[in-house]
Image (spheres, helix red, strand yellow):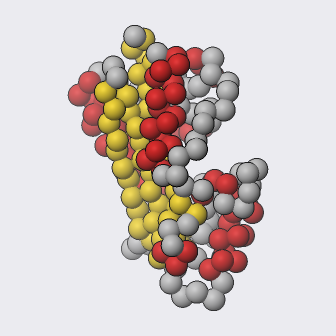
Amino acid sequence: MNKDLVFASANENKILEVSKKLGGLKLLGLKDIGCFEEIPETSDTIEGNAVMKARYIFEKYGYNCFADDTGLEVEALGGQPGVHSARYSGEERNEAANRTKLLNELDGNENRFARFKTVICLIQDGKETLLEGIVNGEIGHEEVGDNGFGYDSLFIPLGESRTFAQMTLDEKNVMSHRGLAISKLKKILGSNL
């Protein structure tokens, strides 16, 4: 078993961001291990997708690894887009179209409560651990801010007047769903390094 740790992501910026949050821990990305195929994400839950991706890397490539999946759950829409957040407007993963669809579906609805949820599945030497980060907030009535990605320009965390897209990366990481889940991951990895 290779003792390097793989983050099951092909997004170099995301890998650097997570590595920084983990205290500079050297992470391998998918391209570093020669994984260029599309990893299946066919579960109907956020947890299921995180587990599916981590197991794929562990079983096929033999690395200790972790994978994450994130969804935006909007109360007025019965928890949608949820596990379908990245493909809410269609299979092409168009972030602008996703935001437009969300705003259209909430048009005229005063219940704007939503939550972002990230689940990380860590596999070390065959042992699986699930970690979760959740942040509550609301969906704004229009896009505000230039930072971030996905739904960040619409999501206003509880207790804030700004969207995630109006915050610096450091500000967002303190309170974000992914930041909270990664903080839990850091505690586990710190005791196992």
Q: How many marks?
A: 0
Q: Is residue 146 left or right of residue 83?
A: right
Residue under the point 34% across and 44% down: 131
On screen, 105 above or below 193? below
x and y percent of residue 105 in the render? 66, 77
On screen, 29 above or below 53? above
On screen, 61 above or below 29? above
On screen, 170 above or below 99? above
Q: Is residue 190 left or right of residue 62?
A: left
Q: Quadrant of residue 191?
A: top left
x and y percent of residue 144 in the render? 64, 70
Q: Is residue 117 left or right of residue 84?
A: left
x and y percent of residue 193 in the render? 29, 21
Residue under the point 63% across and 89% down: 108
Q: Who is closer to the viewer here, 103 or 43?
A: 43
x and y percent of residue 96 in the render? 73, 61
Residue under the point 49% across and 36% down: 52
Q: Is residue 147 visible?
A: no
The N terminus appears in which quarter of the rendering?
top left
Q: Is residue 31 left or right of residue 22?
A: right
Q: Who is closer to the viewer here, 59 or 153?
A: 59
Q: Is residue 111 visible?
A: yes
